[in-house]
Image (cartoon, coloured by chain):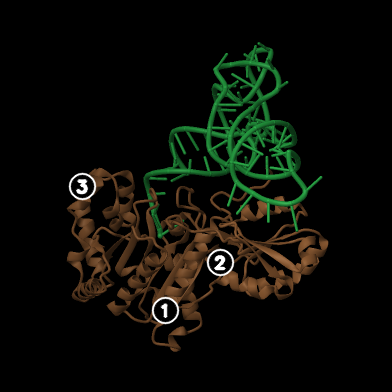
Chain colours: A brown, B green
Amino acid sequence: MKFQSIRGVNDILPGEIEAVQRLEEAARSVFESFGFSEIRIPIFEVTELFARGIGATTDIVEKEMYTFDDRDGKKITLRPEGTAPVVRAYIEHQLNLKAPVTKLYYLGPMFRHERPQAGRFRQFYQIGVEALGTDRPTMDVEVLAMLMAVFQNVGVTEVRLEINSLGDAACRPHYRKTLKAYFKTHLAQFCEDCQRRYETNPMRILDCKKEGCRAVAAKAPSPLDHLCAECLAHFQQVKDGLNRLKIPFVVNEHLVRGLDYYTRTAFEITTTKLGAQNAVAAGGRYDGLVEELGGPPTPGIGFAMGVERIASLMEGIETPRPDVFFALLGEEAVRQMLPVIVRLRGHGVRVEMDYSGGGLKKQMGLADKLGARYTLMVGENELKSGKAILRDMATKAQEEILLTTLPDPLMKIIRS
RNA sequence: GUGAGUGUAGCUCAACGGUCAGAGCACUGGUCUGUGGCACCAGGGGUUGGGGGUUCAAUUCCCCUCACUCACCCCA
């Protein structure tokens, strides 16, 4: 085989795409019922946008971005996530002036240069939302309710919602300092990665899976004990709201997000059914991001869902089957039936036919293989008698239909 | 980026270093000339991922490379 797709970049074939389509439809309909509108953002942006937005020392920016020189020498990057571009668009088009709160969703491919493995690809699809302009805990609750509604809608129910609060500009620096002071006394017990994390992102140590690190992390000061009064109240109201809506969740005080911009509420939805890459959706509040990217101080919250991961959990997705298969014998039958076929399709009926010119047996075989519900047979005999034969493929029952009346009775049967 | 495992037909997999690399499923045709699923028969399809080496002889052993898989890391 001469050409193949680039490593970690996959084709999604018929048979696989149906779950993706269903998920996208579900997300669209749920989001729009919550008053969110779609925004189509570019697939690449100026590199600096991501460096500033995501954080210069994060793994994504340090080693996972697809960055190129444009023809004029400008650095451009294939988007590794959607929040920074959406915020850029929000600022660029001054959406803050058009409404007090802006609720947006997006979907499409993201790109990260990681080593592929189960549930991890270099081009992968995300569906995300961003609600900009309010820091009220009600919005946190709504966003989470909306996220859970999508899972409900597509029948993915064995998921776990974990939430945490990371504090804000007022209290997080203090907590960070306390945490580092504690970790300093245990530095020797950390794994190699955590030795490094101590410098780059000490909060991540809370999240380490290694035995030794976990033991230290277990006794580490909790971020929740160091929240300022405002953050504590906010978190409490988020939890109250979730309880009122009967949305099950667990507080995980070791939950840390990898992107720098998160403040206060952070959350993650995981499943036990996917192997190591078990996060199917994640997000949080980012009250400083808009300002960081050059806009007016504006709070925001959002999440992203991993499309492939969720689609792989969806069950019972059927590939579409033809409503009716036209088994046509002879050129005259084809000539006469083609307008009927086109009219049916114009009404949204799925019509298939044979293109090989084979005999009836062969055409029936094809109809069966395609899973057609009905087969309409028209050959010389039918043209002569003026009656087509309609066969119900499941029951084998056959009935005659007058050719001259054709599209209508057929449509009625199919729709019933 | 690190580590381990795996690459043979469209798919799932066989083949002690030794004849012409096989099977099931799928596909095509036939038994059955106007009625699908079943059965039987026949057929097409392979640079054994690629390159190099060892050997009289390599799908098999060794090296390199590419890809895939899983895990670490990270994350959706």
Mark 2: which amino acid? Phe
Mark 1: which amino acid? Ser
Q: Are marks 1 and 2 in contact (CB under 8 Å)?
A: no
Is residue A294 at least partly visible in the picture?
Answer: no
Q: Position of residue A305 (x, y in %)?
A: 42, 64
Q: Tell me the residue at 63%/75% (across/down).
A: A347
Question: Outermost residue toward the front?
Answer: A385
Give the number of the disc on residue A33: 1
Q: Left or right: A232 with respect to B37?
A: left
Q: CA distance from mark 1 to mark 2?
A: 29 Å
Question: Outermost residue toward the bottom?
Answer: A98
Nearer to me, A404 or A167: A404
Q: Is residue A266 above or below residue A31?
A: above
Q: Left or right: A383 with respect to A258?
A: right
Mark 3 Cα-neighbour bin, 10 Å: few <14, some 14–19, many ≥20: some
Q: Position of residue A343 (x, y in %)?
A: 69, 74
Nearer to me, A34 or A53: A34
Give the number of the disc on residue A215: 3
Question: Which of the two labelled residues, at mark 2 and mark 3, occupies the earlier sequence position?
Answer: 2
Residue corresponding to mark 2 = A44
Q: Chain of mark 2?
A: A
Q: Is residue A183 above or below residue A192?
A: below
Circle 1: element type: helix
Q: Position of residue A264 (x, y in %)?
A: 28, 70
Circle 2: element type: strand
